[in-house]
Amino acid sequence: MADSGRQTLPLSFSVNGTRYDIEVEPHELLLDVIRKRLGLTGSKRSCDVQVCGACTVLVNGRPVSSCTLPAFEARDKDVLTIEGMAEDGKLHPIQEAFIEFGGFQCGFCTPGMILTAKTLLDENPDPTEEEVIEYMNGNICRCTGYKKIVESIMGVGKSEAS
Amino acid sequence: MLRPFRLEEPDSVKAASESLARYGDSAKIYAGGTELLLAMKEGLVHFECLVNVKKIPGLDGIDLDNGNVRIGALSTHRQLERSETLQEKLPVLVEMERNVANLRVREVGTLGGNLTFAEPHADPGTLLLALDAAVVAQKAGGSREIPMTEFFVDAYDAAVEEDEVLTEIVVPLPAANAAVRYRKFGYLERPSAGVALHVMADARRESVQDVRVAVGCVGPKSMRVEEAEAVLRGKSLEEAAQRMAEAGDIAGRAGDAISDLHGSAEYKEHIVKVLLTRAFNDIRAELAG
């Protein structure tokens, strides 16, 4: 990737539990590394200005907009993308709840919604509806009108199926 | 699309200052990057070199010190929002921080970066003006304290020299008989108008002993409005309440409101008055508490 004379930085990090040792240029963005170099296309580029949340990934458990975060910021850290939510072929309870409560239509915002919901529930396992709405207000959905998304998050672990 | 740049990662303020001095205006400090990288992605600015100051230890503490809270400039908005020290001692700052941008921006963006970038549509500077805060700027040759009243020069222009690193924000804790509010209005994430009010009452909580009014977002920079303060200072709380419309008119005009997509200048002036009045009413109720 690097042209001669351009600075490169070693980037050792883990993505969904798999360790990667690559080199990046300072201006390469985490979203591009994840999508184009690692081939994990669940994280979406949409607004590209940190407003919509479609590119949300978790870095050491914290939600960030990967569209505007330089990849080198992930050095020695653990990145979680939507592809890492299921374990051993079994969907995460948040994913199950989104299916059960119909928390998506086109699905484009869903990876970001689910990852942000994960940090919410990690911090606060039993949030009120008001807390869910406040926490999720930086993730935008153009289809559902949010009601089903809030119901999905409120319903995590509470469905009969789970 | 972010154009290539060089990254330097000094481990001390002195080394950072030396890098900045060496590159001059072709380098910029990189902290959270939430505002800087957007401007660079849009091609509005370009820097040959970014100096990452996040490898410098000790710049993200939140400590009480002799009636002040000292906030490391690299503290993220989210750290401030979740700080137990601030929740207990300076809840008005926590409330303001909870409503900055969105969760992801608050996780990454820093208070020092927010102030130094001097984006007019920002919340923290206006509140810090009303809190009579100061910042510490450090460079290879030494450090100095800059009062918030001298910090904002113009839109996107703060009184930090090219080779200075903003290291700390020093906020005096409000007195027991004082109350502070920050009120803002906006659609979507960027505030269209922000007003901060600090009122210190006399010991019997009947009159306005001291007052600070700050207005932001409506014009090029956040500012104190001493003329509006003069209307309220020394008055009984009752009389001050009656004169809020007058103080609000003065504050609205002083904010140098500009007509833009957020609204006309006249509209913003009106909103400033409304927000200031609401802030005062809340403060009065708290002081009566």
Image (spheres, helix red, strand yellow):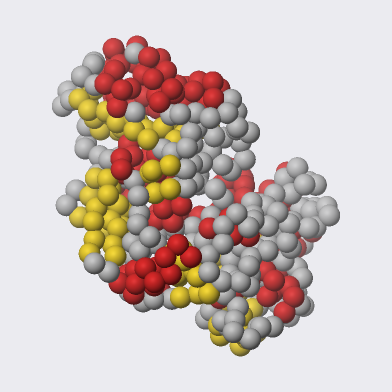
Above or below, B219 against A60 in this view is above
The quarter of the picture where residue B92 lies is: top left
Residue at x-position 72% and y-position 79%: A37
Residue at x-position 59% and y-position 81%: A6
Expressed as whole percent of the image width and height from the top left, the position of residue B145 reads 24, 53
- Quadrant containing the N terminus of chain B is bottom right
Residue at x-position 30% and y-position 52%: B135
Expressed as whole percent of the image width and height from the top left, the position of residue B251 reads 40, 24
Judged from this view, the residue extending furthest toward the right is A106
- State how many labels appear: 0
- Quadrant containing the C terminus of chain B is top left
Expressed as whole percent of the image width and height from the top left, the position of residue B184 reads 49, 34
Image-based side of A102 in relation to B152, left or right: right
State the residue in front, A28 or A131.
Answer: A28
Expressed as whole percent of the image width and height from the top left, the position of residue B275 reads 46, 26
Above or below, B176 against A124 in this view is above
The quarter of the picture where residue B12 lies is: bottom left
Image-based side of B262 in relation to B208, left or right: right
Image-based side of B191 in relation to B86, left or right: right
Residue at x-position 56% and y-position 50%: B102
State the residue in front, B158 or A69.
Answer: B158
Above or below, B46 against B274 in this view is below
Residue A65 appears in view: no
Residue A76 appears in view: yes
